[in-house]
Image (cartoon, helix red, strand yellow):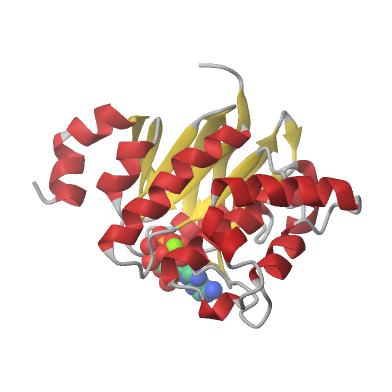
Amino acid sequence: MADPILKVTDVCAGYGGVPVLHGISLEVCEGELVAIVGANGAGKTTTMRTIAGLMRPTRGSVEFYEEDVTGLPAHVMVKKGLTYVPEGRRLFQKLSVRENLELGAFTERNRDVIEERLARVYDLFPILKERSDQKAETMSGGEQQMLAIARGLMSAPKLILLDELSLGLQPSLVERVLRAVTEIRRFNVTVLMVEQRVLEALEIADRGYVIQSGRVVMSGPSGQLLNSEEVKRAYLGI
Ligand SMILES: Nc1ncnc2c1ncn2[C@@H]1O[C@H](COP(=O)(O)OP(=O)(O)OP(=O)(O)O)[C@@H](O)[C@H]1O
Ligand SMILES: [Mg+2]
């Protein structure tokens, strides 16, 4: 395996003194698509928030491109090339598609660069170009999720963290949105995603980590996880 660009070591975190993560370690290499899977409440979002700088770990470290970034705030992480697309999309509903996208590029001042990035995300998701003047709230669930991904890409991240893209989407849209994830690799972006949809996520990921009660209980190449009896029994219902 190549050198990891993200290295999470023994991270513990919680809310108001209540521990949720009990020593999470994981790595992501350049160009990989890695999935964190697990049941409701396992600590997936907490892991993402801790990596993205929205929460401070009580123990452990986060390294990004060999730099210790533990506890740095989220806007600094975005500048360093790590962008988090939160669970539940969090779009600016009253703003247009285009305005939402431009806000994603908040770290960039150069108009030409912003236009270039817009052109690339429109190329990736043509529907966003068609609807660029439409308010975000008028887009369908699947379209809003694509907009959320595209907004994340507007910061030109090296690593994008995608949290539960499939949440609240009907099955046909889940497939479409996850296909979109495989397409963003064209941007030379490394992806760390979180999914409750274990099967669908592992089908598109290179590697996976299974999180249970704030701990990594299994990890490995996706194919290996999909074939493991434990994963089949616990998450795939077979
Ligand atoms: N803001 C908060 N305050 C207190 N407890 C929280 C908060 N957010 C999450 N928790 C608790 O932390 C634990 C892990 O939550 P987390 O959101 O990380 O899980 P998750 O794996 O992302 O779950 P889901 O699949 O439902 O999104 C849960 O027990 C949850 O109740
Ligand atoms: Mg979550």
Which residue is pictured at 69% across the width and 66% down the height?
Answer: 98
Q: Is residue 89 left or right of residue 132?
A: left
Quarter of the rendering containing residue 165: bottom left
Q: Quadrant of ligand 1?
A: bottom left
Q: Is residue 136 above or below residue 208?
A: below
Number of labelled discs? Answer: 0
As drawn, 193 above or below 16: above
Residue in the image at 22% along x and 35% along y? 226
**Along the line of sight, the residue nearer the viewer: 107 or 38:** 107
Mark yes or no: residue 59 visible: no
Is the residue 195 above or below the residue 8 in the image? below
Image quadrant in which you'd find residue 172: bottom left
Percent x, y of residue 4: 60, 26
6 horizontally vs 21: left or right? right
Q: Does residue 5 appear in the picture of this structure?
A: yes
Q: Horizontal and vertical percent for residue 163?
A: 49, 57
Residue lying at the far right in this picture: please name it: 110
